[in-house]
Amino acid sequence: MGNPRPKPKRLADKLRSIRLGLGLSQTEMLRRLGLENSMHYSRISEYEQGTREPSLLTLLQYARSASVRMEDLVDDDVRLPANLPGEVKPPTLTRKPVQRKKT
C-alpha cells in the first residue's frame, strides 16, 4: 500500500500543551474545537497520547483555538508560544454568496 506519510514526533505533546495551556479538560477542549457532536472526548486523549492522529480539519481547529499557525503544530522544530492563546489572528472568513436557481 505504499509508504505511510511521516508523522510529526512532537504533535501529541503540542496538542496536550494547547489544552493545558488553555486550562481546559478534554471535554471542554472537544467543545472548544466544535466537535462535541461528532466525536467522544476520549479521542482527545488518543491525540495526546499519539495513538491517533487528528484530521487536517481538526488540526486547523486546534490551531485556531490556540491562536497559533498550523505549521507551529506540525513542525517539530517550532515551539509553541509559552503563553496560550498565542497572537496569531485567524483570517477573516468570507463566504461566497449562495446562488439561487431561478424558477
Image (cartoon, rainbow, N blue to C red):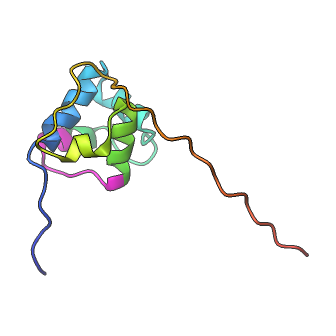
Q: Is residue 102 left or right of residue 11?
A: right
Task: Find residue 12 and report its image quarter.
Answer: top left
37 or 9: which is nearer to us?
A: 9
Task: Find residue 65 and report its image quarter.
Answer: top left
Looking at the image, residue 18 lies above or below residue 43 = above
Outermost residue toward the bottom in this view? 1
Q: Is residue 6 left or right of residue 62?
A: left
56 or 48: which is nearer to us?
A: 56
Q: Is residue 78 left or right of residue 40?
A: left
Q: Is residue 81 magenta?
A: no
Residue 88 in the image, given as x and y percentages of width and height:
38, 32
Residue 53 in the image, given as x and y percentages of width and height:
21, 52
The quadrant of the image that shows the C terminus is bottom right
Looking at the image, residue 49 lies above or below residue 4 = above
Residue 73 in the image, given as x and y percentages of width and height:
23, 42
Taking the spot 64% from the left edge, 52% from the top edge, the residue there is: 95
Q: Which residues are magenta?
A: 46-56
77 or 61: which is nearer to us?
A: 77
The quadrant of the image that shows the N terminus is bottom left
The mark tally for this picture is 0
Residue 29 in the image, given as x and y percentages of width and height:
34, 31
Taking the spot 42% from the left edge, 42% from the top edge, the residue there is: 35
Looking at the image, residue 2 lies above or below residue 22 = below
Outermost residue toward the right in this view? 103
Looking at the image, residue 27 lies above or below residue 48 = above
Taking the spot 33% from the left edge, 42% from the top edge, the residue there is: 40
28 or 78: which is nearer to us?
A: 78
